[in-house]
Image (tube, grey):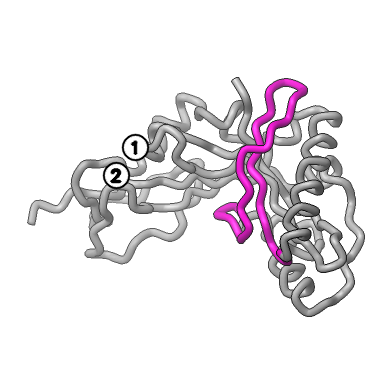
């Protein structure tokens, strides 16, 4: 099966493309989303497992995409979704915007003492010169191995944050962006973003069984179905 890859980049007015921490994209994971092709997060650790030749080809596709956007007058942040099938790299989608992976990508840039894509997006619009950067393969090998799991409500009825009275539990991830107490989250709405150190997938299409069970347990423990 092809592996989904997500790359973050910025296009400058002179045609230069700056590259930023990129990931295996999580798609259609049952514990996180209802959609067969639903976005479910990003694994910034596992992309380094791809060979140098594949990462170099990914970079070629991203730079060509940036050149195409530039010919159509675009400047600033963009993302490219690709499918990697062994040694073959296929362009799947172009996002002329920031992506859901962009905030974590920026955190990883900061951890490496690099200018992130938000700063470079501003620099591109201010007409500042781009700062030369390393090839994608070096960024991927150096970026911290963080991952984010996007947990959407897969229940057929609204959910809301449970008022906990028992002792807190320990998880292998750190929950973020929980909804305010009393707010009902409809089917398909975001329940939480779960941040984790280390890889969470091997193919972008599944989680390790233990981790998937832990995500399901967290959602059941943290959220309830209102009765009225």
Residue lying at the far right of the rendered structure: 132
Name the side, left or right, on which 17 lies relative to 189: right
Q: Are marks 2 and 1 in contact (CB under 8 Å)?
A: yes
Name the side, left or right, on which 94 lies relative to 209: right
Name the residue at 31% across, 66% down.
180
Foreground residue among 127 and 135: 127
Foreground residue among 113 and 75: 75
Q: How many marks?
A: 2
Find residue 117 and report its image quarter.
bottom right
Find residue 221 and report its image quarter.
top left
Q: Main secondary structure of the magenta part?
A: strand
x, y (%) of residue 104? 62, 55
Q: Is residue 170 visible?
A: yes
Dot 2 surroundings within 10 Å: few (below 14), some, or many (20 or more)?
A: some
Name the side, left or right, on which 30 lies relative to 80: left
Q: Is residue 164 visible?
A: no
Foreground residue among 159 and 188: 188
The local secondary structure at tag 2 comes to helix
Name the side, left or right, on which 23 lies relative to 134: left
- The answer to whether residue 73 is above or below residue 19 is below
- Residue 94 shown in magenta: yes
Dot 1 surroundings within 10 Å: few (below 14), some, or many (20 or more)?
A: few
Name the residue at 77% across, 59% down.
71
State the CA–CA distance, disc 2 to disc 1.
Answer: 6 Å
Magenta residues span 74-101
Name the residue at 63% across, 48% down.
94
Looking at the rendered image, the quarter that the N terminus falls into is top right
Which residue is labeled 2 in the image? 221
Which residue is labeled 1 in the image? 217
- Residue 128 shown in magenta: no
């Amino acid at each position: 099966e092809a592996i989904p890859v997500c790359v973050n980049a910025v296009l400058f007015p002179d045609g230069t493309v700056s590259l930023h921490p990129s990931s295996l994209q999580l798609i259609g994971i049952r514990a996180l989303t209802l959609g067969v092709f639903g976005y479910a997060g990003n694994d910034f650790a596992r992309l380094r497992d791809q060979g140098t030749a594949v990462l170099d080809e990914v970079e070629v596709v991203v730079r060509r995409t940036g050149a195409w956007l530039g010919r159509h007058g675009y400047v600033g942040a963009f993302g490219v979704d690709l499918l990697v099938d062994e040694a073959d790299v296929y362009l799947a989608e172009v996002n002329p915007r920031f992506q859901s992976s962009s905030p974590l990508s920026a955190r990883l840039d900061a951890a490496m003492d690099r200018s992130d894509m938000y700063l470079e997006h501003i620099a591109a619009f201010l007409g500042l010169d781009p700062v030369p950067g390393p090839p994608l393969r070096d960024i991927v090998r150096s970026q911290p191995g963080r991952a984010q799991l996007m947990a959407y409500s897969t229940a057929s009825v609204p959910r809301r944050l449970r008022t906990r009275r028992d002792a807190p539990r320990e998880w292998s991830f750190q929950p973020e962006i929980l909804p305010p107490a009393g707010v009902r989250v409809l089917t398909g709405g975001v329940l939480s973003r779960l941040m984790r150190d280390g890889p969470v997938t091997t193919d972008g299409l599944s989680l390790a069984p233990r981790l998937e069970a832990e995500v399901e347990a967290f959602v059941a423990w943290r959220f309830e179905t209102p009765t009225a």
